[in-house]
């Protein structure tokens, strides 16, 4: 039931994020509430705590990137929903894999656009001068073009990798 719910939530979120660059509250918020209720009714207070802790960890993993402007609120709620369904350990691994996949996707795009060197130089300069960029990767200084990735994709890949790893181990 849990993996089916996660697959459904992720499928809808990836589609809407690709089409409209939004992860809908009508998907994530009911997913969170249904997960907490489901776990409470199936395993009592232990299930409620399992779901609640997963929710909080999922929320916490992307909260700082959200505050820095590098990620949207829908992405935060999506990872929180995954945590509510699957618990702390699952959402931690999903977050790690999503971060790795997001970085690889960003690097691939930068290499394809021939802007990897500029971006790395810009990031190092920004870090040294403590100048903020609100979490976005600035592509060209003259046009101020920003690289933006629909982050539901790395989250979905991260969750699927976590399910795969659980199955293999």
Image (tube, rainbow, N blue to C red):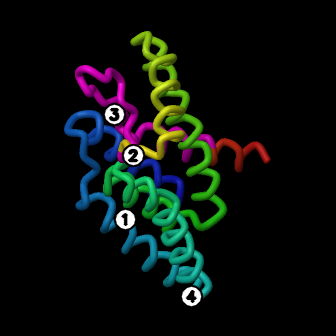
Mark before the other along the chain sequence, 3 or 4: 4
- Distance of label 4 from label 1 (alpha carbons): 18 Å
Q: Report if the CB atoms under discs 3 and 4 are less than 8 Å apart.
A: no
Q: Residue at x 55, y 28 (%)?
A: 104
**Residue at 55%, 67% in the rendered image:** 57
Task: Tell me how far mark 2 sits from mark 3, CA to CA.
Answer: 17 Å
- Between the residue at mark 2 and the residue at mark 1, the CA separation in whole angstroms equals 34 Å
Question: Residue tagged by mark 1?
Answer: 31
Closer to the chain start, of discs 2 and 3, is: 2
Q: Give the secondary structure at mark 3.
A: loop
Give the structural element (helix, strand or loop) at label 2.
Answer: loop
Q: Which residues are magenta?
A: 134-161
| Residue 149 placement (x, y as % from top left) | 37, 34
Residue 44 numbered mark, or none: 4
Cα gap from disc 1 to disc 3, whole angstroms: 26 Å
Q: Are marks 1 and 3 in contact (CB under 8 Å)?
A: no
- Residue annotated with mark 3: 148
Q: Are marks 2 and 1 in contact (CB under 8 Å)?
A: no
- Residue 11 visible in rendering: no
Write down the residue under mark 2. 132
Judge the density around disc 3: few (<14), some (14-19), many (≥20) Cα neighbours within 10 Å: few
Height in image: 103 above or below 13? above
Q: Tell me if residue 158 is in the magenta stretch.
A: yes
Of tags 3 and 4, the one toward the viewer is 3
Identify the secondary structure beneath mark 4. helix
Between 161 and 20, the one lying in front of the other is 20
Task: Find out whether the residues at labels 2 and 4 contact each other: C-beta distance under 8 Å.
Answer: no
Choose the circle earlier in sequence order: 2 or 4.
4
């Amino acid at each position: 039931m849990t993996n089916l719910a996660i697959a459904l939530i992720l499928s809808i979120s990836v589609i809407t994020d690709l089409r409209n660059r939004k992860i809908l509250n009508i998907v994530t918020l009911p997913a969170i509430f249904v997960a907490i209720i489901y776990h409470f009714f199936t395993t009592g207070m232990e299930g409620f705590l399992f779901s609640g802790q997963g929710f909080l960890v999922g929320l916490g993993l992307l909260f700082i990137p959200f505050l820095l402007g590098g990620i949207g609120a829908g992405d935060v709620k999506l990872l929180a929903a995954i945590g509510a369904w699957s618990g702390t350990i699952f959402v931690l691994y999903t977050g790690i894999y999503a971060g790795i996949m997001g970085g690889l996707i960003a690097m691939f795009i930068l290499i394809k656009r021939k802007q990897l060197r500029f971006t790395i130089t810009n990031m190092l300069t920004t870090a040294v001068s403590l100048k903020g960029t609100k979490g976005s990767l600035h592509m060209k200084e003259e046009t101020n073009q920003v690289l933006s990735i629909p982050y539901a994709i790395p989250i979905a890949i991260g969750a699927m990798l976590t399910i795969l790893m659980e199955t293999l181990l």
